[in-house]
Image: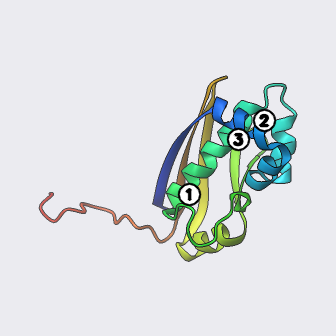
Amino acid sequence: MNVIGIGTDICDCARIAQMIEKHGDVFLKKVFTGNEIVYCSRHRASVPHFAGRWAAKEAILKALGTGWARGIQWTDLEIFHAAGGRPRVRLHGAAALISHEQGIAEILVSISHTATTAIAFATAVGESGKFPSGPQDPDCE
């Protein structure tokens, strides 16, 4: 497997709390899948969990190298948990198509948060990487 892309993002929990307070379910349903809303809402302090998913989605877009281009929607990127609690990524729609076009087999994600800040790191891996093995600079030995 080769690294095809990496991304990281940091998110202020207060920003997400303000969006939830101002826009409520409209915001939640635009940004998060139904499964993500259920998961985060189960926690008494749900905002850091929503912020962590926000940061993860931004990090994933950076790993894909697309940003919000090519028709990607927030809900095309879904964070779920495997057995043992490890966060995993499920892609839908345009994000899944772009991932397939780039030869991405899996996107690994790590999420951490405090009461005030959330951070995420994403690594896209696959068989056809953008980064060749060995030096990229011809003057480098």
- Snapshot quadrant of residue 115: top right
Q: Which residue is mark 2?
A: 21
N-terminal of the pair, mark 2 or mark 3, is 2
**Farthest residue toward the front?**
22
- Snapshot quadrant of residue 16: top right
Q: Nearer the viewer, mark 2 or mark 1?
A: 2
**Farthest residue toward the left?**
139
Kind of residue indicated by mark 2 = Glu
| Circle number at residue 61 | 1
Q: Position of residue 130 (x, y in %)?
A: 40, 67
Kind of residue indicated by mark 1 = Leu
Residue shown at 25%/63% (left/top)?
Answer: 136
Q: Nearer the viewer, mark 2 or mark 3?
A: 2
Q: Which residue is mark 3?
A: 86
Q: Position of residue 135 (x, y in %)?
A: 24, 60
Q: Is residue 136 visible?
A: yes
Residue shown at 71%/34% (left/top)?
Answer: 18
Kind of residue indicated by mark 3 = Arg
Relative to residue 38, is residue 131 drawn left or right?
Answer: left
Q: Residues within 10 Å of mark 2 (few under 14, many from 20)?
A: few
